[in-house]
Image (tube, rainbow, N blue to C red):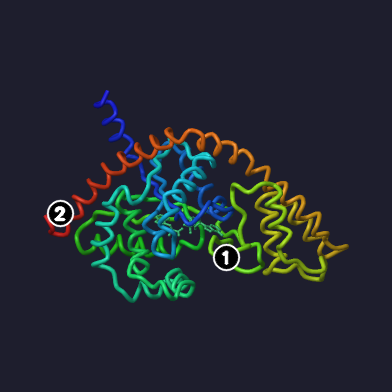
Amino acid sequence: MENNKQSLILAQARNKKVFSGSRPTGRLHLGNYLGAVKGYLALQDRPDLDCIYSVVDLHGITTPYDSKTYQGQIREVVLDYLGCGLDPQKCHLMIQSQVPEHIELAYLLGTIYPVSRVEQLPTYKEKRAENPDYLNVGLFYYPILMAADILIYKSELVPVGKDQLPHIELTREVARKFNSMFGEVFPEPESYETNGTYVPSLIGSGKMSKSVEGSYINLTDSLEEIKKKLAGAPTDSGKGDKVPEEGGVANLLTLVELFEGKEEKEGLEGKYLGDGIKYSELKENLANAIYKELQPIQEKRKYYEEHLEEVKGILEEGRGYCSIIAKETLREVKRAMGLV
Ligand code: AMP
Ligand code: TRP
């Protein structure tokens, strides 16, 4: 039995790797779902791939957080993942800090990466601006740890939203540099984007984000909550001689396209240029379409909420599997770097 399990692990481990993760900053929202989790789902179904999906708790502590509720937040994301349909028969689910090799590799990769490049990253600048009183070394290390998350499994595909592309580029650079200094160890991973790679905010500007109040709809929101949140989204008079390309109306139309399809969006654009859009109707239809997609997710999530022992087992499997591969890569890296 043990032997069978071991050979199954090794056979799977030979498949092309996929890695991705989300920070446990709260429950997942539509941006996370459309931009990232839908990609996780598409890739777990491909038999040529071996997918590892993570809750990146070590990234989550680089911005202000509450240590007393943190374990609960981590669990919320795991439940959201399972509710969305991540299937423990098709992928591995893991908590980042449970495989400490990620951190060790991050330190090692940090020694070959220039400080100036990290400082130029838009994501680093953004977070620094959001939390000027919380500028910590961990935040600086954020993209290097992310590169380590990906490279420790020699991952080749990384499903992420558009905001993460600079980090994937950095990961590729790190891999190239490492290989040129110490010999070929890492593949250069590529991003995998869904058609919802950039989900706009409900408040009219920027992306849907947990750190901006009023900007997001959670996967666990009820129909009433969704309606209430959409009601707050800014609109205009409903007609004009040019359909807005940015702002509240443009964002609503993007959400219509993502949940009701391109035709529906084009129909509304026609109305904008003609008799005018009735936003109350648009928002009512959009709320219903969003809820229709979320309802089955919420039902599945409820099953796992009531079967937490099963969830614990799934995470144990993930930790065990990932540890085996991570240890192997780290050994190879240390050998290449002359540390053993
Ligand atoms: P985070 O919550 O920042 O850890 O993000 C987890 C995943 O969701 C990452 O792959 C992000 O790129 C993706 N994501 C977050 N917000 C959005 C958004 N508004 N649109 C598309 N993808 C997003
Ligand atoms: N930085 C990512 C985000 O904010 C989360 C993340 C950490 C990640 N490590 C990763 C995503 C590795 C993909 C692969 O969304």
Decide which of 273, 104 is in the foreground and name it: 104
Q: Which of marks 2 and 1 is nearer the N terminus?
A: 1
Count of marks placed on residues: 2
Task: For the residues labelled 2 and 1, say whether their Cβ atoms are less than 8 Å apart.
Answer: no
Q: Mark 2 points at which residue?
A: 335
Q: Residue 212 carries which label?
A: 1
Q: Is mark 1 on a helix, strand or loop?
A: loop
Residue 175 lies, with reference to residue 92, above or below; the image says below
Could you tell me the amino acid type at mark 1? Val
Q: Quadrant of ligand 2?
A: bottom left
Q: For the residue marked with disc 2, what is the amino acid?
A: Arg
* Relative depth, front residue between 201 and 159: 201
Q: Residue at x 52, y 45 (%)?
A: 80
Mark 1 CB within 8 Å of ligand 1: no
Relative to residue 296, is residue 337 drawn left or right? left
Q: In this view, does 43 lie above or below 246?
A: above
Cα–Cα gap, marks 2 and 1: 45 Å
Rendered location of residue 223, percent (x, y): 70, 47
Farthest-out residue, front: 68
The image quadrant of residue 230 is bottom right
Q: What element carries label 2?
A: helix
Q: In this view, does 211 lie above or below 311?
A: below
Residue 61 x/y as whole percent: 39, 60
